[in-house]
Image (cartoon, rainbow, N blue to C red):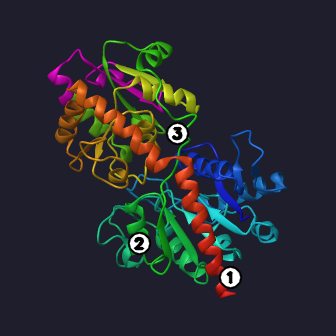
Amino acid sequence: MIKSLHLSTSDFNGGAARAAYRIHLALVASGSANRMQVLHRGNDDDSVSTNTSRPFTARLAQKIHRRWVKHGSRDWKTDNPVLHTFGQIGTGLVPALTASDADLLNLHWISNMLSVADIGKLKKPIIWTLHDMWAFCGGEHYVPDDKSARFREGYRTDNRPPGESGPDLNRLTWEAKRRSWARQHFTIVCPSNWLARCAHESVLFAESHVHVIPNCLDTRHTWQPIPRTKARKLLGLPLDKKLILFGADGGVSDPRKGGDLLHEGLARVISTKPHLYELLIFGQSKSTEDNSWPCHVHWLGAVDDDHQLVLAYSAADLMVVPSRQDNLPNTAIEAQACGIPVAAFTIGGLPDIVTHQATGWLARTFDATDLAEGIIWLLEDEARYAALAAAARKQAVERFSEAVIADKYTKLYHQVLARFSSQI
C-alpha cells in the first residue's frame, strides 16, 4: 500500500486548506495509508499532525525570518491586491521529510511551511496540488491571465507591471524558484482545466506532467440537501422570499470575489420584483455598508462548521459566485452538492462546475446585466428550477464525490512511483 504524506499550511483555515483536508479524508476513506502534516492544525484528527517536534524553535525562526522579509520589502509597492508570498520562510522540515517512511509527498498550499529552497531539496517523488497560481508565478497568488503574463514569458527586467515599484520581489522570487527547482521533477495536479492550462503554459512547469483532478466533498454523509423549510426555520430566515446566497472568506471585501459585480447584478434583479428577493452572505458579519445593498441582507458571519454551511446552502434558492478570478471555488461545488443551482461568470474553473442552463447559469465575463438575467431565469419557473436543482446535485455526486477523486489520486500515485522507480 502506498504511503502518501500531504503537506499543507493548514487543514482548516481558508478554502485551500479545506480542499486539501477533504482530499486527505477521501484517501483515508478509500483505505489509503495517507497522512497529513500541517503548520496550523484546526481539526481533532489523529491522521493530521503538526509539522515539527520543536515548535518553539520553529516559531522563533519564523518570527525572525518574517521581520527580515518585512525589512527587505519595505520599499516594494504593487497595485495587485492579492496575497503575495516570497517563499523565504520555512520551518526546517526537509530532514524529517527525507527520513520519513512516506513513499511520496503531496504538496498543497504550503506558504510559510516550506520555503522555495526547501522545496528544491525534497528527495521523494512530489505531487503538487495547486490551489492558486503561486507555484508558477513570482510571489503573487493570482495574476491576470493574459498572453503577456510574466509566468508565460519569464520574469524579466523589461516586463514588470506598471503598478509595481521598488525592488522587483516577484522577479527575484521567480528566479529563486527556477534555480532551486531545476532538478526537481514535479507532477502537477490542478483542480480546474483553467489552472492546468496556465501551469502547462508557464515557464516553470512547461516540462512537468500536469493533471486535472477536482477537489472533493463527502456527498454521502455531510454534503447533501436538507429540506428548505427546515433549514430556514433553523436559521431564522423568512419562508416566503427568494434567498440568493453569496459566500467567501472575508465576504464581499475581496475584489477578486466580485462583491461589487454581485451588487450591480442584484440591483437589476431586485428592480423587477422589489419585495421578492433577499440576500444571504456568509464569511462576513454585518457591516456599516448594509444599507447600500438594494435588498435586505442576512449576514451569517464566518461559518466554519460544514453542517452549518449545509444549512445555509439548503436554505437558499440560488448561489451566486461572481468571481473575477478563481480556481475551483469550494462554494460552487458545495452549493451543487446541496442541490442549489449556481450563477457565475465564465471564468477560471467555474465552467468545470456549472453547465450552462443545465445546472446553473454562466454569464458573459463580468457582465452584471447577463448575470442578473441568469438569476431571474434560474428562479422564475418552478418546474425548470426543480430540474436544475436535481441536475446540480447529480453532477456534484458524479464529479466531486470522495470515491471518484480518491480513485483518481490513487491511480496517479501508482503512475508517479512507477515513473520515479524507472528513473533511479
Q: Are marks 3 and 2 in contact (CB under 8 Å)?
A: no
Question: Counting residues from the N terminus, which is met first, the one under dot 3 or under dot 1?
Answer: 3
Q: Are marks 2 and 1 in contact (CB under 8 Å)?
A: no
Q: Is residue 126 magenta?
A: no
Q: Which residue lies at the image location 31% right of the left edge and 41% below the top edge? A: 359
Q: Name the image quarter holding the C terminus.
A: bottom right
> Height in image: 40 above or below 424?
above
Q: Which residue lies at the image location 37% right of the left edge and 61% below the top edge? A: 194
Q: Is residue 324 left or right of residue 382?
A: right
Q: Which residue lies at the image location 30% right of the left edge and 66% below the top edge? A: 146
Q: Is residue 272 magenta?
A: yes
> Height in image: 23 above or below 245?
below
Disc 3 residue type?
A: Thr
Q: CA distance from mark 2 to mark 1?
A: 31 Å
Q: Hey, which quadrant is residue 380 in on the image?
A: top left
Q: Is residue 193 left or right of residue 221?
A: left
> Height in image: 113 above or below 371?
below
Disc 2 residue type?
A: Phe
- For the question of whether residue 390 can be seen, the reply is yes
Q: Name the image quarter holding the N terminus.
A: bottom right
Q: Which mark is residue 151?
A: 2
Q: Position of residue 326 (x, y in %)?
A: 39, 52
Question: Counting residues from the N terminus, which is met first, the one under dot 3 or under dot 2?
Answer: 2
Residue tagged 3: 219
Q: CA distance from mark 3 to mark 2?
A: 36 Å
Q: Position of residue 164 (x, y in %)?
A: 39, 63
Residue tagged 1: 421
Q: Nearer the viewer, mark 2 or mark 1?
A: 1
Disc 1 residue type?
A: Ser
Label 2 residue SS = helix
Residue toward you, 163 or 415: 415
Q: Which region is colored magenta?
A: 268-296
